[in-house]
Image (tube, rainbow, N blue to C red):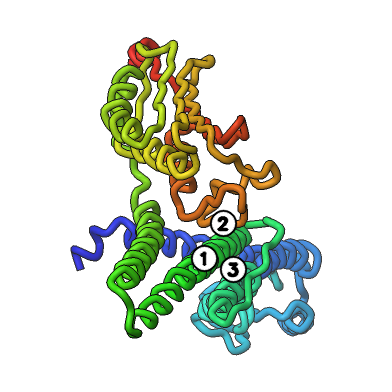
Amino acid sequence: MNKVWKNHKVRRNFIIILFIIVWINVISLIFWYEIKINPILKNIENSKEIISKEELKENYITIEELENDLEQLSNKYHIILKITDENNQVIKENNLQKSNIQLFSTLIKIKNKRYMIQAYLPKNITPVKLILSLNIFQIFTIFILMTSAYLFIGHYIITPIEKIINDIRNYKFGKKPMKKEVNNEIDVIQNEFANLVDSLEQEKQEQKRIIASISHDIKTPLTSIIGYSSLMEDNLSKKEIKEYSAKVHSKALHIKDILSTFDDYLINYDNKKLKLTVVKIKEIIKELNDDYKIELNNKNIRFIIRTNCENEKINIDILKIKRVFSNIISNSIKYVPQKGTIEISIKKEKNMIEFSITDNGTGVKEENINKIFDPFYTTDDSRKISGLGLSICKEFIEIHKGTIQAINDNGLTIQFKLPVYEEKKKQDKK
């Protein structure tokens, strides 16, 4: 019990319930007083004034005359009257009980004798009945309040929540939820669920497209492998066997490359966090020369790096940015001619460092230039961009708060920008 009570939510809920109960009781008491007690009190006060000052005489001739007047008053005002003499002997009493509430008392003279007249409220206004009527009124008030609360909660909370639950169930069967005009928090939840469904649907369509693209790309080399394998069952010369084996090996490597792009897709979605390091541009230039200079020279490809901002700094995840350069340069290598050129230009523009990687290979059709960053884009015959290489480049640049674009410029230029690391501002903030 102590452990339960230590829970702040339990204490809070208990206090809320206690407050509601007290509030309902206070409200019901106020209403009950105004409806039941206050009219009785006013009636008692008025009746007392009228009876004692206007209805009763100061002197009566006979006791019988007094009794007749009191009988009429009893019937008229629905009260119980009691007459006692000077010796406290009861002259007349009509069903008086201890539970009756005294209304008033007054002295009357009859032939030099004094009589005490006492008026009481009838039996139907006893304390027990008043308390009972209070309880009944409270039960009625609580019933009305609880019914109102139930109808309110049902209309504004339970029904909308049930609709969201039904939308969740219906989504299993392909029915998408609809957005609503926002009037309350429940509508916000409904719209957030609808937005989530839209995101899931887009992701599902993207996955279907990627799977279809991989399936399509695998079919062609796989068909070739099957064809060459069938031919190798015939009586072939050693030269033909060697040639067909090389074809099968080449197509198998092609399938491996296609499947590796699918691995890239999975890695990309599991690799959103950045491990940032501040580096100078000249350090990036050195890394690029170390990684590509010899390889490109061996392939008779000129590799040029130009910059006017080698001492500027950028705050980057080095592995991811190296992956960006690798994907772009690897794509360029496929399309530059013998003795071709790959040039990297690095310059500062305002608070950004601009990297431009240009090759003199075949370009991309202008109408398709903005599509090459889409995953598995393969529709451009002039320069077939397949896989996820450039798509991953776009993802990595954007999570660095940079931008990337493609430009046809006597070949293809991939240009991306990254924010300059401003050390002075950072120190000022500290």
Amino acid identity at mark 2: Thr
**Foreground disc of the pair 1, 3:** 1
Q: Residue 256 location, x and y as percent?
A: 34, 63
Instruction: Please name the residue that numbered disc 1 is placed on.
Output: 213
Pinpoint residue 298: horizontal percent, then vertical percent. 31, 34
N-term mark: 1 or 3: 3
Whether the residues at callouts 2 and 1 have beta carbons within 8 Å, the answer is yes
* Neighbourhood count class around disc 3 (C-alpha, 10 Å): few under 14, some 14–19, many 20 upward: some
Residues marked 1 and 3 touching at CB (< 8 Å)? no
Q: Secondary structure at mark 2?
A: loop
Q: Amino acid at mark 1?
A: Ser
Residue that mark 3 sits on: 157
The answer to whether 423 is drawn above or below residue 328 in the figure is: above
Residue at 49% across, 21% down: 352
Quarter of the figure with the N terminus: bottom left
Q: Residue at the spot x=73%, y=67% of the render? A: 47
Q: Position of residue 25 (x, y in %)?
A: 52, 65
Residue at image mark 2: 378
Where disc 3 sits, the SS reads helix
The reply, left or right, for residue 265 in relation to residue 120 is: left
